Image (cartoon, grey):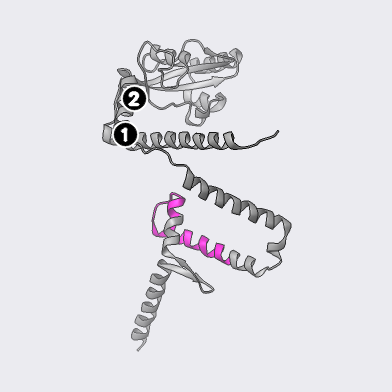
Amino acid sequence: MLANFNRMALGVAAALTLQLAHGATVNGVAIPEAAITDTLRAAQLPDTPPAREAIKQQLIARELFRQQAAKDKALEQRPDVQALLNEARNQVLTQAWLKDHIKPAPVSDAEVRARYDAIVASLGDKEYKARVIEVADDAAASAALARIKAGEDFGAVAQQVSLAPSKTAGGAMDWVSFKVPAQEGKTQNLPMPIAQAIASLPEGAITPAPVALGERRYLIKVDAVRPTQNPPFDTAAPGIRQALQAQALERATLALVTGLLSKAKITQ
């Protein structure tokens, strides 16, 4: 009998676990499995049992809060709450209207291929993996360079003194390729002085003197040089298409704004 009871208890526990894995109800309000999946995707989290459980608990808490707030009838009448509700309503309506009226031109396969070919044509024979330290003036540049010449690691100095966003990565930049000699506007968005310095350095070398760019000064190290490695078209195409779609969306949005401005009466 005890064995049978234990088996029954285990069966009930398993059934409850299975039920919970497929969602939950909170005071009779269902939290469907789809809501958990959608929240996971929106948060860009891996679809794993622990992640699903964590999201489910968050949704349960949110539903409990919502139910308690709904019971407070005076809450909705407060001026500050009314203002927030109106703002949220306006945002929802605005986003819905924009979705209906912004119609970017579709990106064709030919456009993706043309963009890929143009990118490949803009690259040089070599690509460089470099590090950069950006400082405010000559004195700071000289002090950083002296530390490096004395044996300190370039990346460690970058983390301590660089003003560039790459400081947390020790000044490391992405692989970059451009035709040599560098030409203005054809250096993959690198400022000309920095591109020229990178191209002039052998692998492992550091600029012997700071590179001036406006009021800032730069120390550059080339960690590695290799033949340019172009990704296959099929690999690069999704990213290129996404970039072209973003540009098409930007153009369509600008056209819509321009049209609305031309008809609007605006006083300042």
Residue highlighted by disc 1: 236
Q: How crowded is the residue under tag 1: few (<14 C-alpha within 10 Å), some, or many (20+)?
A: some
Q: Residue at x 45, y 27 (%)?
A: 172
Q: Quadrant of the C terminus?
A: top right
Residue 95 against residue 193 in the figure, above or below: below
Q: Indicate the position of residue 101 as horizontal and vertical percent values.
A: 48, 44
The stretch drawn in magenta includes residue 58 = yes
Whether residue 35 sits left or right of residue 120 in the image: it is right
Q: Could you tell me how far apart the alpha carbons at marks 1 and 2 are, in whole angstroms? A: 11 Å
Residue 49 against residue 162 in the figure, above or below: below
> Given contact means CB atoms under 8 Å apart, are the residues at marks 1 and 2 in contact?
yes
Taking depth in this image into account, of 107 and 115 the one nearest to the observer is 107
Residue type highlighted by circle 1: Ala
Magenta stretch?
40-64
Type of secondary structure dominating the magenta stretch: helix
Q: Indicate the position of residue 256 as horizontal and vertical percent values.
A: 51, 37
Q: Is residue 123 visible?
A: no
Residue highlighted by disc 2: 119
Q: Indicate the position of residue 245 as horizontal and vertical percent values.
A: 40, 37
User: What element does badge 2 sit on?
Assistant: helix
Q: Quadrant of residue 108?
A: top left
Whether residue 1 sits left or right of residue 70 in the image: it is left
